[in-house]
Amino acid sequence: MNASELVTSLSQKGIRIWAENEKLNIRSPKGVVTPALRSEIAAHKTEILALLKQGDRQEICLENGLSLSTIGHLIGGMKGTSTRLPIIDARAMAQKVSVTFRPLPKRYKNTKILQFREALKQQLWYQGVRVVAWHEATRQFKYTLKLPILGWKKTIQIRTVKTSIDAVIDVERSPSLWSRAKNIAAEALYWLYTRTVARGQTLSIPRIAMLIGWAEEHAAKTVEDPTRTQVVMLTDLNPAFIHPQTSYRQKIDMGINALIRTFSEIMIGVSEDQISILNMNLSDSVFPTADLERFVAKSLIPKIFVPIAPLLLNQFEVGQYNPQTSDDAGRLVELGKALAPTGLFPPGFKLSKMIQRQSHRDIVDRLVNGRTGVSYGFVAYIKAPQYVGAPEIDRDEWETLAPVQGLSPVEVRQNTHGRRYAKVRTGNSGDRQSHRFRQIPDIWVVSARSGANKTHLDLNQDVLQIGLTNQLMLQLPEGTDPATDIKPSYDLYVMVAIALSAALYTPSLVENGAPIVHFHGYPSADWFKANEYWTGAHNPSVPCGTYESGIFNFLGLSSLTNLPSENIQLVSLIEPDHGANFIASDWEYLVERLISGCEQGQIELGGKHFRSLAHKSPAGVT
């Protein structure tokens, strides 16, 4: 095995390897690097260092010809790229996660939860998660509340969870009459403070927590930074939530109310023989209790590793466009209307109607970046990719191109006009993988704004344009104030990743533009016809809006390179615990297939059909 083959093998095992000052650094899931493997790495150290130095922070190329860092750089745009390298292996995610368990309330007697809590703690530790004792994960914090007008002052002392902790795991606590009385008093104090001291100023989440936290029983009051540390709540499994006769609309109401009641980001329901997991994605995934190891690895750890978070406007170059002159914007409105009969896009809800307390509404407002409503699913339309010059060049011309700062010259180069080209693998030629050198085009997607009714879009205020050039672009309808509740979808990384991957690997699919839709359900494996494909059912279940969700969708389309691009009619990119994305070259074909699937009971919201996808190999996908 030569150096190149060795580092490729290490990458497939979830081992990250990089060079720093002539030193070879290795980060590996626990137990993967054996003494024999370590000796082999040492024997090839010089060659590996030379290989890694070919690019800035280069990682080993995947089967599609690009490394994870390059894919992340491209889908994030030059301005919006995360400084964190993408991680897609659940074992590697576990190595970066730290959790703590909040002490149990006095006289807690739920034996079922107690047993599960201990088993969960052991399983997290076994998989490489750092389980930190409560006294080490927290620090003593003292502050003083003052109301100058009333001359009232009180010193509060609590233990807060440090920002280095990714999740605090708690059990649901039944509120007492005394705790309810304290909550009423705290809300009155908050109301008075915002009108006398703050006087309309926007309070930070920590400041709000200081004002109300002394009265709260939920674990969120102990979190130093709610944007960094998630609350995972253990509770009794609600049989109605996982019952096959419970509609998805009912599940939305039940799930949101449960998350709000416990002020948690993730809820784990526990029964004698089943485990359910719930977050704002509103999946209804259920695992056998005996399958705790898979539940923790594939579902829980990824959700803790990358929490749901919207992209902030400062990550975009913000501009405006005229939706009345955009054929693609009009086409998106028609697409939404055509999808109404499927019932796959619930209208959503207003946060103000779901959250009763003003203090809690203000906290959630900060967390969701000013969004006033939540809806499930998205509709978008990819414009035809925009090229300047040749969309594809030969190897001789590739050799003349210059490197791009921050990217590996093995993977991406640019011409004298600044147009970038990627060296991508596009299938096999005999026993050797073939390469093409394709221009990275400018990508534009028209998308429904976050919280909009996807099947009844208003052309003048519900449709945004998202661009991916050297950075992320956001264009709002003319006359729109960016400060208003017109925000891009949480799934923005997914949209641009699908569009870019299609342009590079399945260009026939998007050469004239293409619709992409997402809903929180799945098709049955038997629904797919010839030239229709699915992939992704075995991915770790990272939530929407995350860097990794975009990576997985990019990789899903790039895995189809062994298929003739012109024969692909439809692709479904499966996101475990979240839903399914669909792309097709013809939007009428996509609509017809989705409607017929719903009518035949082969497509439904919720997780009913996911098992069939996870247990059957999709034809043509390798």
Image (spheres, rainbow, N blue to C red):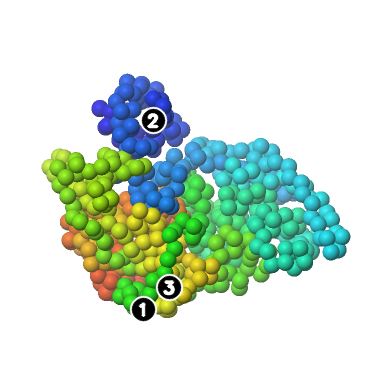
- Left or right: residue 9 compared with residue 287: left
What is the residue that sits farthest to the front in this orientation?
Answer: 416
Name the N-terminal-most of marks 2 and 3.
Answer: 2
Q: How far across and down, in percent of the image, does residue 449 sit?
A: 45, 69
- Residue carrying label 2: 19
Query: Can you see residue 414?
Result: yes
Which quarter of the figure has residue 493?
bottom left
What is the residue that sits farthest to the left in this orientation?
Answer: 430
Which quarter of the figure has residue 186?
bottom right
- Residue carrying label 1: 324
Q: Which residue is found at the position 67% from the left and 54% from the top?
A: 206
Along the line of sight, which residue is nearer the eye, 261 or 187? 187
Q: Amino acid at mark 3?
A: Pro
Q: Are marks 2 and 1 in contact (CB under 8 Å)?
A: no
Q: Using the numbered discs, state the Cα–Cα distance from disc 1 to disc 3 in whole angstroms.
A: 9 Å
Q: Which residue is found at the position 42% from the left and 66% from the top?
A: 319
